[in-house]
Amino acid sequence: SLTVLGAMCSGDLTLNVGLEVDPRLYTVLLGGSYDVKKSTAMRRTIEFFEPLGVSRSLHVMYGVGSAEGLGRCLSKWAKVLLAYDELRTFVDKTKVQTSVLLPLTASLYEQHHWENVTKGAEHDVSVRNARLSMLGCCTTDTYEQMWTSEAVAIGFPNRLFIVGADRKAKVAWPQAPSPTKLASIRAELAQQLGKLPLRLEITGDAKAAWENLYCAFPSSE
């Protein structure tokens, strides 16, 4: 929910911390291969936010084949959410020789512009004022083995927000959520989104708490 909502608010919701802060995330739902309904959770979350996302000009892509393709999409829609049922599909695409998909997505984690000018103009990639988010599912075993040395060197795994998708209990026959409750939640979110653009301040207590935590971090990777 945070990933989809953050993608919709990108560019209109900021934080007054002296640095450029964007609510976009690259999120991975990580869990067992059969025991956790990761894909179902992702799909239903996107479906819930879909009516709100249209009003915020958010485009959901369920896969991309190349940096050129992603660049064209970002030129058409300023806010894009990449959704992967299997995150490894994305990682495998970045392994293609001469592909710049990995540098593109790594850079757009915090930036909004990216260019790759080549000898052949048909392969040029130019991205301006783009806001990319990512949401993917992955099993624990696959996550441990799928990364290339290039992905690690460029720091891509460090950009991922890992969410443990552990199952709390077994439910043989899940009940459908109440349409009335869902409509009420959507209405409340629509009201909050209507207040954008908005710049949030930090309380004194929050500043002190973060400063204490930040200064206590050891100087190592």
Image (cartoon, rainbow, N blue to C red):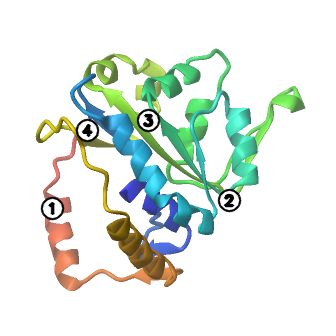
The 10 Å Cα crowd at callout 2, few under 14, some 14 to 19, many 20 or more, is some
Q: Position of residue 77 (x, y in %)?
A: 70, 55
Give the side of residue 47 with respect to residue 171, left or right: right
Is tag 2's residue or tag 4's residue first in the polypeptide sequence? 2
Which residue does the numbered mark 4 point to in the structure image?
221
* Amino acid type indicated by mark 1: Leu
Residue 24 visible in the picture: no
Front in this rendered view, residue 218 or 140: 140
Is tag 1's residue or tag 2's residue first in the polypeptide sequence? 2
Is tag 1's residue or tag 4's residue first in the polypeptide sequence? 1
- Distance between mark 4 and mark 3 Cα atoms: 14 Å
Labels 3 & 1 near each other (Cβ < 8 A): no
The 10 Å Cα crowd at callout 4, few under 14, some 14 to 19, many 20 or more, is few
Report the residue at 32% width, 36% height from top.
38
Which residue does the numbered mark 3 point to in the structure image?
156
Vertical arrangement, residue 12 with respect to residue 69, above or below: below
Which residue does the numbered mark 2 point to in the structure image?
129
Report the residue at 50% width, 23% height from top.
89
Which residue does the numbered mark 1 point to in the structure image?
213
Q: Position of residue 2 (x, y in %)?
A: 37, 58
* Amino acid type indicated by mark 4: Glu
* Amino acid type indicated by mark 2: Asn
Labels 2 & 3 near each other (Cβ < 8 A): no
Give the side of residue 110 with respect to residue 210, left or right: right
